[in-house]
Amino acid sequence: MRLRAAGLRVRLRRTEVLHGIDLELDAGEWLGVIGPNGAGKSTLLKALAGVLRHTGTLEIGAGPRATQIALMPQAPLLPDGMSVVEYVLLGRTVHLGWLRGETRRDRRIAADVIGRLGLDEFADRPVTSLSGGEAQRAVVARALAQQTRVLLLDEPTSALDLGHQAEVLSLVDELRRQDGISVIAAMHDLGSAARHADRLQLLAAGSTEAVGAPSQVLDPAVLSRVYRTPLDVHRLDDELVVLPHRSTTTGRNTP
């Protein structure tokens, strides 16, 4: 499914924090949304998901937005006393009629995504007892159980160590290639964004500064200006790595 947004604007209280964002996403594509803190990344995802009111146009296909787009928030709430399977079943809520409980099909879908994400052994455990990486997989499972065609990820690895970061991002990449799901991910790590995303959209102060292939958007001069610090972009084993600029004046004696 193709998603297209044009002129998205969001006001919080009396301040406009998103200024006419245009965005396009093809079926099966991964778009990485990058930018410094306060750039508007989370606000954009919440506007696309319908969590925040916005102006502008959004084309996402037929049906309610909640059946087209699933949002994995940056700090998801993990309810006390709820098992993993119960938590994943929350993803089916948008498909339930008024006062109708989960059906056998809903439970089958939840069991399927739990199995695909390797959570079978944790299905009956409290979701709050999971480790960081396990909990993130449970959150992804809940989003997948919603069976939407677009998955929004808001800093999906911000609380994880390096090993679990790579695990979660690789898992999402594998699932979107298998199922044709489109992904928009707000990402802090620019190297990971370049590794997984087909295209990047760079935001600054609520506006789009650049959009295109990672090799085009990760321009040292543009990044240094947007992030307000000197940055270099290196290519290592055919991957892009962004590092702080190493000053020629180090304060040490040179031979």
Image (spheres, grey):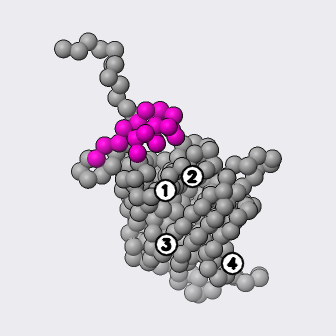
Would residue 233 be counted in the magenta stretch? yes
Residues 81 and 193: in front is 193
Question: What is the distance, in whole Å, between disc 3 and disc 2 at their CAs?
Answer: 19 Å
Residue behind mark 3 = 26
Question: What is the distance, in whole Å, between disc 1 and disc 3 at their CAs?
Answer: 14 Å
Residue behind mark 4 = 64
Residue 158 shows in the view:
no
Q: Residue at x 72, y 55 (%)?
A: 10
Q: Do labels 2 and 4 touch, CB within 8 Å?
A: no
Name the element at disc 3: loop
Residue 208, image x and y in percent?
57, 52
Q: Relative to residue 127, is residue 142 depicted above or below?
A: below
Q: Residues within 10 Å of mark 3 (few under 14, many from 20)?
A: some
Q: Residues within 10 Å of mark 2 (few under 14, many from 20)?
A: many
Which disc is residue 208 wearing? 2
Residue 111, image x and y in percent?
50, 78
Which disc is residue 211 wearing? 1
